[in-house]
Image (cartoon, grey):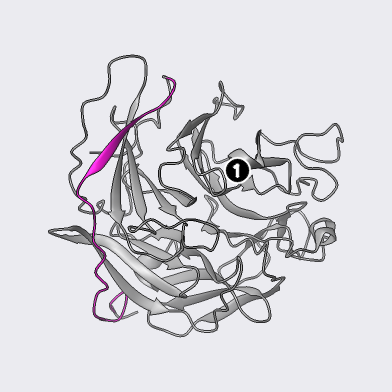
Amino acid sequence: MSARPPYPRKSPLRVVVAASCTALLLATAGCSFGEPEPDPAGEPPNLPTPSASAPDSGAGQPVVTTMLAKGLRVPWGIAFLPDGGALVTERDSGRILQVGPGSGRDGLTVTAVQTVPDVSAGGEGGLLGIAVSPRYASDRTIFVYHTTERDNRIVKLELGGQPTPILTGIPQAGIHNGGGLAFGPDGYLYASTGDAGNREASQDRKNVGGKILRITADGKPAPGNPYPGSPVWSLGHRNVQGFAWDAGKRMHAVEFGQNTWDEINRITPGGNYGWPQVEGKSDDKRYANPLVQWPTSAASCSGLAASGRLLLTSCLRGQRLWLVELTDTGTVLGQPRELLTGKYGRLRAAVAAPDGSIWVTTSNHDGRGKPAPEDDRILRLVFSDGGAGRG
C-alpha cells in the first residue's frame, strides 16, 4: 500500500491552550496510577510545561491538571494515533479533530480533519465513539460510532475518505444511544449500545440495544462470542458509554442508572447486568452485581479509563472524577476517591494516553451544563509522584 497522508491538508482550527495548570489535592493517600508501560505507539505529544505550585505537606497526594485545549463543542470520544496525537469527536458538529502531537507557542495544535457525513445530532445522539485500527500504520483506518436519522451505526474510513458502514441497525432515540468504541486486548472491536428508551430490548438477545458488542473489523460477530452468530458480548445494560481494560486485561464498563444507582461493572462474556429488572446490587443470582455503585446525583458517569490497577470514571451530573483502586485479583481496594468535584462542570470522556497520563473532556455545551468561557475543554491529569504521565 503506498504511503499517504493521515488526513487532508486543511486550514487548522486554532484552539488556544492554557499554559497554566492547577495543583489539586486528593483526599486520601496511597492512590497511584503506577509506572506506565513503555509506549509502543510512538512518542508522546509535545505538551506545555506545567507550573504547579508546591504540594501541601501532609498525607495527601497532589495531581496536576493542565488544560490542553479549549473552545470545543461537546468533545465525546478520544483515540490516540501512533505518533502520540489524538483524534477527538465532537458530538453535535460531526467533526473529527486532531489534537497534537505538534505544538506551537500556545500549546498543542488542534486541526479539524473531517466532518463525518450523515450524522444526525440531537439529544444524546450524534458523532460519538472513535477507535484507531491496531494496524493503523499500514491500513490508515479509523472507526466511528454515530447516530443517523434511522439508526446508530459503526463505520470505518480513512481520514478524508468516505465512510463504509460495517454494523447498522443499532437502535437510536433522543436518549440512551450508548456510543463507546474501542479495540480490546484481543484485537477485536468492542461497542456499547443503549436501550434507546426501550427497556425490554436490553434482555432480548436478538436486539443489539442495551448490549456490549464484540465484532471484527468488518462488523461480523467475533469468534468466541458467547452466543454463536451474534455480536452480543454482554446484555442487560441501560446505557453504557465508557469501558476499559485493567492491567489484568479484565474489562470494566460504567453504567448509567435510572433514579437510584450508577455503576461500574466487571464485564464477562455472556454476563447479564440486570436492566430493567434490577438497578444496582441485588440478591438475584441471575444478574451480575456491580463492582462499585454510587447515587446518580454523585455520578452519572460517561467515560472510563484504566491505568494499572486504577479505574478512573468521569461524571456528568456528578461533575467529578471517581478513582477506584483494584487488587491483583480485580476486587476493590479501599473506598473510591473523588477528584475535581465541581471544578470543571460536567465531565465526559476519560482515556489513558500513551504517555501514561489521563485525558478528560468537559461536556458543558451538551444542553445540560452551564458553559464557562473556555468550554468545552480537554484536560490532562498527571500525578506529581510520577505515577501517571512522564512529566
Q: Is residue 358 magenta?
A: no
Query: Residue 9's quadrant in the figure?
Result: bottom left
Q: Position of residue 309 (x, y in %)?
A: 49, 31
Position of residue 292 relative to residue 48, above or below, is above
Q: Position of residue 288 (x, y in %)?
A: 76, 39
SS for callout 1? strand
Q: Position of residue 389 (x, y in %)?
A: 30, 39
Q: Main secondary structure of the magenta part?
A: loop
Res 70 visible: yes
Front residue of 368 and 286: 368
**Range of magenta residues:** 3-28
Q: Quadrant of the C terminus?
A: top left
Position of residue 177 relative to residue 240, above or below, is below
Position of residue 1 relative to residue 109, above or below, is below
Q: Quadrant of the N terminus?
A: bottom left
Is 144 left, or right, of 376 in this rendering?
right
Front residue of 133 and 174: 174
- Give me the residue at 76% from left, 63% from top: 197
- Give me the residue at 26% from left, 65% from top: 15
Q: Is residue 25 magenta?
A: yes
Q: Position of residue 273 (x, y in %)?
A: 76, 45
- Residue at the extreme left: 105
Res 309 visible: no
Query: Residue 374's quadrant in the figure?
Result: bottom left
Residue type of the residue flagged with mark 1: His
Front residue of 239 and 253: 239
Front residue of 97 and 164: 97
- Residue at the extreme top: 58
- Residue position marked by numbered label 1 in the rendering: 252
Position of residue 136 relative to residue 9, above or below, is above
Is 179 left, or right, of 233 in this rendering?
left
Could you classify mark 1 by the number of other residues whose Cα lies within 10 Å: few (under 14), some (14-19), or many (20 or more)? many
